[in-house]
Image (cartoon, rainbow, N blue to C red):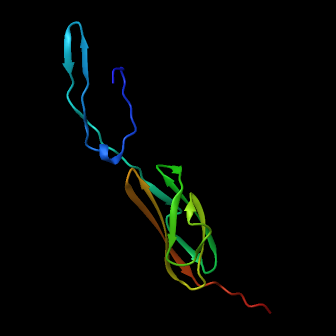
Amino acid sequence: ATASTYSFTAANADNGAAFKVTVSNTAGTKTSNAATLTVNDGSLQVTPGSVSIAAGSAQSLTARLDGVATSVTWTRSGGTLSSTTGSTVTWTAPQVAGAYSVTASITVNGAAKFFTVPFRVTPAVCTPVN
């Protein structure tokens, strides 16, 4: 590069790379000390983070990578999902009380990221009718 600035899109493989700059003018040439690159490949979050819900009820979930809604792959240990991909899905709890989970996963710069939302499903409350 020959400009006064240099930019590129970093990948996980670039983590730890050393960069130096060499400048030249009529007075001579100087090379800087190395600067080491640290690649942060993002943080996956799902909201809400945990839920207690009645059997058969539905809950919307949204995935965000570094605060931005992002399309992920969704899996579940019970119940049903409105979709298996996208940034927002709706999970419908099974009719049986218990512990379940929904997991969002994505690959960023070659690194897999997962976020699991635990669900506690409580029995549905029935109100007798007179």
Compare residues 94 and 27 and report the one nearer the observer.
27
Residue extending furthest toward the bottom: 130
Q: Is residue 105 left or right of residue 16?
A: right
Compare residues 101 and 112 and report the one nearer the observer.
112
Compare residues 50 and 38 and report the one nearer the observer.
38
Looking at the rendered image, the quarter that the C terminus falls into is bottom right
Question: Whole-percent x and y of residue 117?
Answer: 48, 68
Vertical relation: 37 (above or below) 90:
above
Residue extending furthest toward the top: 26
Quarter of the view holding residue 14? top left
Residue extending furthest toward the front: 1
Say which residue appears at 63% left-offset and 79% top-offset: 56
Compare residues 50 and 72 and report the one nearer the observer.
72
Vertical relation: 119 (above or below) 129:
above
Say which residue appears at 50% left-offset and 60% top-offset: 46
Question: Whole-percent x and y of residue 107?
Answer: 42, 56
Question: Whole-percent x and y of residue 81?
Answer: 59, 71
Looking at the rendered image, the quarter that the N terminus falls into is top left
Question: Whole-percent x and y of residue 38?
Answer: 30, 42
Say which residue appears at 50% left-offset and 70% top-offset: 75
